Image: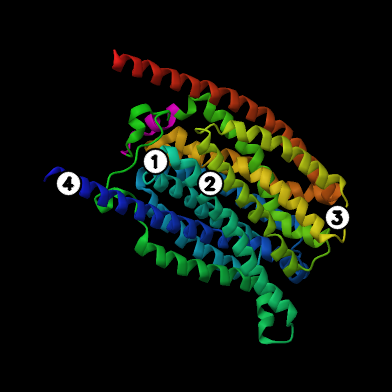
């Protein structure tokens, strides 16, 4: 092969890689957005369940218990499934978790007794926990380090815009059922059908992705891009080959930066899950919107968060991966935003409530989107990215356990203003940990640049 043919072949391979990177990104985006159908359905059905099952004793606090058990199993699943993904592979686990979520979501909609609802929802959230870890593992093998913050910012839109679309889709169907209570459409306002529709829709997405999603460029005869050289495994992190359990886990556990990220994840996930679970209920209780209207209006939270996540990813890549410089200022603004929600009266003022919700979401999701996304890729490389994502998310969802039953108790005793003040307090503590991460990450970046300069000088000599 002459030089011209070689250059042409390289150009064709690069074009093919870019095309399949786009296909993979869209597939992962659509797939993980679909996962949220199995989660958003409970938030949309929440007011309907209280209304339609009150005779059977299904109260807000009992639904809060369902939420909390689900977050607990989700946290456990994040850790367990993160490890499994690094051994089995991203594509396989992504599709398996989706199919299992389809089954559990349908089963929840056909259940009645509280113990059964708790168990089925717990199983549902466990299988859902496979999705993001598998997405991170797949992304680690498809995208180069210098673009990963932007890519993960884009993929974070899958659980933000996807959540918004899912809420609009399911909430819109409920609103139609409520608008025409004496027509065949009335069945759409039955809480059980919310889950059955979500399950069927996700099933269609799972079948489609089975035909287009690939684990790695190697399946297409292409080279994998390089991982972040600063990962905790060093040069070994450039390979996705499996290693013994302790060899996978210990480098992460021994990293102070890893623990600081877990601390930030704990606080921000608690706050995020509180709004994910209760935003439609807040708009229903405080702003006076009907259940269907509140479900649609609640999509402002993931929409505003999506804008924050995408902007944060692009800004981080432009700043050379210095995520801490964005995390710390965002948390300072978030504290003031949560405080404003506590003291400003939004009763009967839904647009003001939505505006405050949007500001809170923007400055919450911007830093949150880094945690089990690009930060996990930075730490784990190709070898341990899913494990890093699982452990970081697992730490977060331990905090998120309080977002169900705990938030319901605070709201019952101190109303929603008490909830917002409590979340502002959580954010203050999280800010302290974020400052520690900023210091550690800046030191690591400086050390890496110094080492590169020494190598460059030695090579010139």
3 and 2 marks in contact (CB < 8 Å): no
| Label 3 secondary element | loop
Residue 45, given in percent of the width and then of the height, sits at 68, 66
Residue at point 53% right, 46% down? 153
Measured along the vertical axis of the image, is residue 181 above or below residue 104?
below
Report which residue position mark 1 lands on.
144
User: Which residue is outermost to the top?
Assistant: 461
Q: Does the magenta portion include 446?
A: no
1 and 2 marks in contact (CB < 8 Å): no
Q: Earlier in the sequence, mark 1 or mark 2?
A: 1
Task: State how far apart marks 3 and 1 are (Cα).
Answer: 46 Å
**Front in this rendered view, residue 329 or 38:** 329
| Label 1 secondary element | loop
Task: State left or right for residue 376 relative to residue 41.
Answer: left
Front label number (1 vs 4): 4
User: Which residue is outermost to the front?
Assistant: 4
1 and 4 marks in contact (CB < 8 Å): no
Measured along the vertical axis of the image, is residue 147 above or below residue 452?
below
Task: State how far apart marks 4 and 3 are (Cα).
Answer: 68 Å
Q: Does the magenta portion include 244?
A: yes
Q: Which residues are magenta?
A: 241-251
Residue 159, given in percent of the width and then of the height, sits at 56, 54
User: Which residue is outermost to the left?
Assistant: 1
């Amino acid at each position: 092969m002459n030089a011209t043919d070689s250059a042409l072949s390289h150009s064709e391979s690069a074009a093919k890689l870019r095309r399949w990177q786009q296909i993979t990104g869209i597939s992962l985006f659509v797939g993980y957005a679909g996962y949220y159908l199995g989660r958003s359905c409970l938030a949309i059905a929440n007011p309907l369940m209280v209304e339609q099952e009150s005779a059977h004793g299904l109260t807000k606090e009992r639904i809060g218990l369902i939420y909390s058990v689900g977050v607990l199993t989700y946290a456990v699943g994040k850790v367990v499934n993160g490890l499994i993904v690094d051994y089995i592979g991203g594509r396989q686990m992504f599709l398996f978790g989706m199919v299992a979520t389809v089954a559990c979501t349908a089963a929840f909609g056909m259940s009645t007794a509280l113990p059964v609802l708790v168990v089925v929802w717990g199983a549902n959230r466990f299988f859902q926990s496979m999705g993001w870890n598998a997405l991170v593992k797949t992304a680690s093998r498809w995208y180069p380090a210098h673009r990963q913050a932007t890519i993960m910012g884009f993929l974070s839109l899958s659980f933000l815009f996807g959540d918004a679309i899912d809420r609009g889709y399911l909430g819109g169907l409920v609103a139609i059922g409520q608008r025409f209570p004496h027509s065949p459409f009335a069945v759409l306002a039955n809480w059980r059908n919310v889950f059955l529709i979500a399950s069927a829709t996700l099933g269609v997405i799972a079948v489609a992705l089975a035909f287009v999603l690939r684990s790695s460029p190697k399946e297409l005869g292409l080279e994998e891009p390089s991982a972040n050289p600063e990962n905790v495994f060093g040069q070994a992190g450039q390979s996705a080959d499996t290693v013994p359990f302790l060899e996978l886990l210990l480098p992460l556990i021994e990293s102070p930066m890893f623990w600081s990220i877990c601390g930030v994840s704990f606080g921000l996930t608690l706050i995020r899950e509180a709004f994910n679970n209760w935003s439609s209920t807040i708009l229903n209780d405080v702003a006076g919107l009907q259940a269907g209207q509140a479900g649609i209006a609640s999509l402002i939270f993931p929409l505003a968060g999506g804008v924050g996540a995408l902007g944060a990813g692009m800004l981080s890549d432009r700043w050379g991966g210095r995520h801490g410089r964005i995390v710390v200022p965002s948390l300072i603004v978030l504290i003031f935003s949560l405080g404003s929600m506590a003291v400003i009266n939004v009763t009967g003022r839904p647009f003001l409530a939505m505006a405050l919700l949007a500001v809170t979401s923007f400055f919450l999701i911007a830093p949150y989107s880094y945690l089990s996304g690009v930060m996990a890729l930075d730490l784990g490389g190709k070898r341990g990215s899913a494990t890093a994502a699982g452990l970081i998310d697992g730490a977060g969802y331990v905090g998120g356990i309080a977002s169900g039953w705990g938030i319901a108790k605070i709201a019952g005793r101190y109303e929603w203003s008490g909830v917002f003040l409590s979340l502002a307090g959580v954010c203050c503590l999280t800010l302290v940990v974020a400052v520690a991460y900023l210091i550690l990450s800046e030191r690591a970046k400086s050390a890496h640049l110094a080492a590169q300069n020494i190598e460059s000088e030695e090579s010139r000599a």
